[in-house]
Amino acid sequence: MRSILLLFLIVFGPKTLTPEFIEVMKRTTWRAGCPVAPSELRLLTLPYWDYEERSREGELIVNPSVADEVDAIFRELYEKKFPIEKMRPIEEYGGSDDRSMEANNTSAFNCRDITDGQSTSIL
């Protein structure tokens, strides 16, 4: 069992973002004033079950301080076969929460003003 967990962490563990992806983030989900630099974020590749009960792989961008916890949560969801329609970085939706939600997409990092316009949300 330990070797399976190790393989899981190697394949699906947190990865640093590529310079190319960071450039996309700078145009969509990150801006000056965000409390975390893009180079500090991590990419998680996670298994999930889609609505047709097919095993898929998705990606979430997260702060490394929560990467292990997020990984554990999604691993538990996968074990319980909890359905997720899709799991793509919000950059694929131009950083638009509305477009991502309309697609029923599960995403994580998006540095943007919260609706009151007075502070920043990084979820």
Image: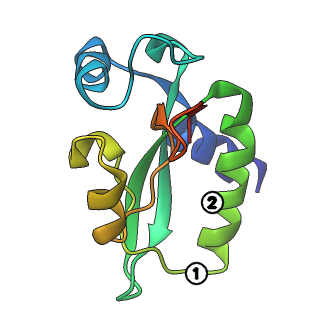
Q: Percent position (x, y) of residue 65? A: 73, 27
Above-or-below relation of 71 to 101: above
Above-or-below relation of 35 to 67: above
On screen, residue 45 versus residue 36, left or right, reads left
**Residue at 29%, 18% in the rendered image:** 26
Q: Nearer the viewer, residue 39 or 111?
A: 111
Q: Percent position (x, y) of residue 76? A: 70, 66
- Say which residue label 1 marks: 81
Q: Nearer the viewer, residue 19 or 24?
A: 24
- Say which residue label 2 marks: 74
Which quadrant of the view contains residue 67? top right
For disc 1, the neighbor class at 10 Å (few under 14, some 14 to 19, many from 20) is some
- Check disc 2 and give the amino acid type: Phe
- Check disc 1 and give the amino acid type: Lys
For disc 2, the neighbor class at 10 Å (few under 14, some 14 to 19, many from 20) is some
Q: Percent position (x, y) of residue 82? A: 58, 80
**What is the total number of numbered labels drawn onto the structure image?**
2
Specify which label sits upstream in the sequence, 2 or 1. Answer: 2
Q: Nearer the viewer, residue 1 or 118?
A: 118
**Residue at 59%, 70% in the rendered image:** 78
Quarter of the C terminus within the rendering: top right
Distance in Å between CA atoms under marks 2 and 1: 10 Å
Which residue is farthest bottom? 52
Q: Nearer the viewer, residue 79 or 10?
A: 79
